Image (cartoon, rainbow, N blue to C red):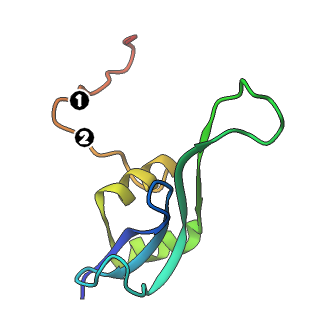
Amino acid sequence: MVLKIRLARFGKRHAPFYNIVVAHARTARGSKPLEVLGTYDPIPKTPTDGNETAKKFKDIKLDIHRAKYWLGVGAQPSEPAWRLLSMIGLMEPKYRPGQELKKEGTVA
């Protein structure tokens, strides 16, 4: 069976909330996963320190050790999961067509 690291959607209609899960590739998005690795909240939140001008952030919580284990076993991340794992530093960012590669020593 092929394993996938993917996002399972929860939350309300205009307030999505995702669990980062490991599941068999052919199971439905909302079915019971093998393991929940973490959560992702895509709605930007302001920091709680009271500074209103601070930059908003999106909350990502992930068990890195378990994610490394599942990647080592051969689980394939979906496109959105790949983006999240590359933000954390577990995966290399994918090259997108039309995106120019940065060359060292040049200023963009």
Q: Residue furthest right?
A: 49
Residue drawn where x is 40% and y is 71% of the image: 71
Q: Quadrant of the N terminus?
A: bottom left
Q: Camera-side residue: 24 or 101?
A: 24
Residue carrying label 1: 99
Distance between mark 2 and mark 1 Cα atoms: 7 Å
Q: Is residue 93 left or right of residue 26?
A: right
* Position of residue 42 in the picture relative to residue 50 (left or right): left
Percent x, y for residue 74? 32, 76
- Structural crowding at the residue carrying mark 2, measured as other residues with C-alpha within 10 Å and reported as few (<14), some (14–19) or many (≥20): few
Q: Nearer the viewer, residue 77 or 28?
A: 28
Disc 1 crowd rating (10 Å Cα; few below 14, some 14-19, many 20+) is few
Estimate the x, y position of residue 81 in percent, counting from the top left: 38, 60
Q: Nearer the viewer, residue 108 or 57?
A: 57
Identify residue for label 2.
Answer: 95
Farthest residue to the top: give it: 107
Which residue in the rendered view is the most extreme toward the front?
Answer: 13
Q: Amino acid at mark 1?
A: Gln
Is label 2 in contact with label 1 (beta carbons under 8 Å)?
Answer: yes
Which secondary structure, mark 1? loop
Q: Residue 66: where, in percent of width, then height?
A: 54, 75
Above or below, comparing residue 35 to residue 17 in the picture? below
In the image, taking residue 59 as reference, residue 29 lies left or right, namely left
Residue type beneath disc 2: Tyr
Q: Which picture quadrant has residue 104?
A: top left
Query: What is the quadrant of residue 100 in the picture?
Result: top left
Q: Residue at x 22, y 39 (%)?
A: 96
Q: Is residue 40 above or below residue 49?
A: below
- Say above or below: 21 vs 52: below
